[in-house]
Structures are given as C-alpha cells and as structure tokens.
Amino acid sequence: MQFNDYDPGNFYDELFASEGKPRPDAMPLVNRIDSLSREEVQRRQEAAQIALFKMGVTFNVYSDDQGTERIIPFDIIPRIVSADDWATLEKGLEQRIHTLNLFLADIYSEQKILRDNVIPSEIIYSASGFLKPCIGLKPPGGIWCHITGTDLVRDRSGQWFVLEDNLRCPSGVSYVLENRRVMKSTFPLVFNTMAIQPVEEYPSHLLETLLNLAPPHLTDPTVVVLTPGIHNSAYFEHSFLAQQMGVELVEGRDLIVADGYLQMRTTKGLKRVDVVYRRIDDIFIDPTTFRSDSLLGIPGLMDVYRSGKVALANALGTGVADDKVIYSYVPKMIRYYLDEEPILANVPTYLCWEQQQQQHVLANLDKLVVKAADESGGYGMLIGPTATAQEREDFAARIAASPRNYIAQPTLSLSRVPTLIGDQFEGRHVDLRPYILYGKKVYVSPGGLTRVALRKGSLVVNSSQGGGSKDTWVVCK
C-alpha cells in the first residue's frame, strides 16, 4: 500500500480527509496508485519527466549561472478539485474579472471610483502599472483584461482565498496543457474511470477570444503572438501557444508601422496585423511612448492602437490591477461596481502606507509575509517565520523607506498534496492558478496550474524559486 505511511499533517490535504481516509473524489486515484509497486510509481514519475523533457517544456531563469533553460519539475500525483468547489471558484473568478475590467475602464476614463473615495487617488497615481498614455483608450468591446491568471490558495480550514491577480502577461498555461497530455499516458485507466473535465480546448478558446477583438468587417483577420525572444523565461509557452493556435510567432523586429497600420514583414512583403497577443510588458512595447531604450517593441504602435487599427491582448495599462496594494481594494470594487458581495475572499492584507498598519507589520515581521507591490515570481518577498533576524531588519528598512511599495499578510497554512519525494509520499504546499479568458463571454479553463513547493516546509511555489507543478483534475458533476 503506497499511502500507508502518508501523514496529511495538520493541514488541509487535497487528497486525504484524514490519515488513511481519501476524499471521495480521490478514491479511484488512490486505489490505483495503491495497486502499483513503489518501483512502478517511480518508473512512471521518471517517464513523465522524460516525456516533458522531450517535448521541450522549459522555462528560463535569468540569474541562473548553470545555463538559462530548465525543465520545470513535475510531480505525477495530481491535485483533485471537486465539482462543487469548482462551481464556486468559477463564479467567483467571473465576478472578479468583470469587476477588474470595470475598474480598468473607469480608472482610464471618468475615474468615478476615485471621485467617490472608494480608493485613494494617490494609490492609483503612484502605482508603477498606471500608465498615463493609456488614459482615454477605448479597447475593442470595452474589454481590457482578455487573459488573466488568478492565483488562489486554500488555508487549513479548506477555505479558498485569492492571493493575487495577474493581468499583464500571465504565464504557465502551456504547462497545464502539456502536464495533462503526460498524465493521460501515466494513468490511462484512471482517466477512463474518472470524469475529469478537459483542458485541451484552451487554445481554441484563446484564438476565439483574440479573433473577437478584430473589426467585424474583416473576414480573415491576422493574429500574431508577440514575444520578447528566445531568452525570455516563458519563450516555450509563446511558441507553444502560437503553434497550437496556428498563428505567427513574431518579435518586435518582425513588425513595423507603415501606412497607419501595424504590418508584419514576410517573404512576400508587408502584411497587415489586426490582433496582437502580446507577451511583452507595457513599457517595452513602444519606445516612442514608453521606454525609449526598448529594443523589443515597435515604434509608433501606440498611435495605431489608439486609432483602433490594431487590437492588443491584454490592453495596455492593465498592470495597474496587478499592484498588490490595489489588490487589497478589489472586494470594495466588487461592492462598488456590481453591488454584490465577493464570492472569493482576499487574503487579509496590511497596507504599509497606512501608519497604524505599518506599525503592526513592523512589530510582527516574524509572523507575516511581506511582499513588494509590483514584484512577481516570488521575488521581493519576506516570509517572516523562516527569515533570519538580518532579513527582517532589512525589510523593516525597506518598508520605512518606501511604505507605498509593501503589503503584509498573515502566513497562511497552505493546503498540501501528496508528492513523490525519493521513494516516499510527503505532503507539499500548493497554490492554484486558473486561467480566465474574456471574449464574447467569460471562459474559465477547468482547473489550472497547480504549483507545488518542493522544498520541505516551503511556502514558495514559484518555478524560479525551486517550485514544480502538478496536473489539476476538476471532477465533473
């Protein structure tokens, strides 16, 4: 029996209700794994990792002196989400995306939410993601956030929380698709017996979302995926999604503004581009409007975009909603724009720019997680309970020097999933990033990317910080 010695510990375990007692939805999987020898489980784990290697599923780490490309670690024990849980998450994510879209449309036009004092105006104007050149923009259909990856966590009681929103260039969906492909060959019998919602439709939904942005009079609009290039950390994903959608993968040097349109250089001359799925941050996309030293973007693109002759996904300026200080106001936004109560709660958050809350944070750094407002990938973060006294002292100085740039949250006891460590199953902490597409309607891809902290006791799941991934199985009703 594989799980005889598995101890769920004092955490919410995604597969086990208690020691030796699988959750009902996980029973077929647990029974199947129990029927295999440990050697066979390890063989399947190794085969899955080799398959991903052969498929070229990689990511780049800029600071890595051992070479840029790495294979993201993958664990074959999936996370299972019940149909009821997923129904709640789906509704909550739809509510949140509608709200964030209304917020972006408002903040770059009438700014009613500021005039009504729901959010302090200085919080918006001091956000690095708030781009003044985007004021007055009118994206096609009024949609700003076409592709979103929202990070969710579960605490010890099993309650779901939104950890952060990612609206600029959310990555990771390629791992979802490739992980599923590998898992179908790893546990084929389980897939035949369990009703697991498919994820393979994501690329077609993504293409439909992008085509929805093109002017309706165009019968055959041209869509491209814009990548910073081969050295970008998510280049595999850029090329993978372009291939899956059957569209061109381009770099800034492949595009030019000519005759008032965005044009692509081809062997037959220039070809007009109608929709750009950009995987380049806003400030690098047009050196004539944003960073003049950018070699990645296309001079003059902003003028074409403003004139409505090209569509961008996501719209420029969406990064303001990624700001972790602004994240803390999303529940208020939901009440303000929709007159509804939030379906999914935020993690309780302390804002260091507020004096009283800052004093609480500084007095409790050994108990809190501190995050920089505009960092991602696990960078710019202090996990107080495991930090050294010197690290806490350094962060106290950072907070005092730039209080607007920091928030703090309680250290949640993240849920865990059994993970193969050597020849044993051990619990490891996980989060979940579902992917949401906003076209004619909102589509939430079933499941998402489960990221796992492979280091024992670690709460940091980011691949750049030593984390791995698991497949996520959403069970049908």
Image (spheres, grey):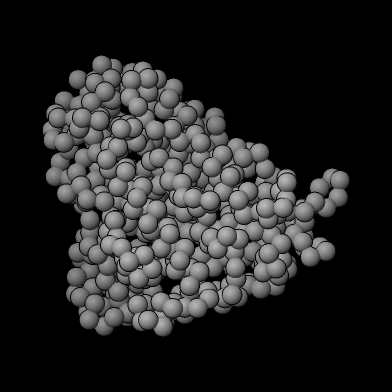
Viewer-side residue, 68 vs 74: 74
Residue at x 37%, y 23% (from the top left corner): 191
Q: Is residue 340 left or right of residue 166?
A: left
In front of the other: 172 or 263 = 263
Question: Quick one: quadrant of the C terminus?
Answer: top left
Judging depth in this view, the residue of 11 and 17 nearest the camera is 17
Classify 107 as above or below 88.
below
The answer to whether 11 appears left or right of 203 in the picture is: left
Q: Is residue 468 above or below residue 297?
A: above
Above or below residue 85? Residue 331 is: below
Residue 332 place in picture, x, y as percent: 32, 70
Left or right of 238, for residue 8: left
Q: Position of residue 307 (x, y in %)?
A: 70, 68
Residue found at the far right of this picture: 268
Q: Is residue 85 visible?
A: yes
Q: Dividing the image into 4 quarters, which one contains the N terminus?
A: top left
Q: Position of residue 113 (x, y in %)?
A: 41, 77
**Residue 26, above or below 362:** above
Quadrant in the rendering for residue 206: top right
Residue 457 seen: no
Q: Residue, x 53% and y 76% (percent of image)?
A: 109
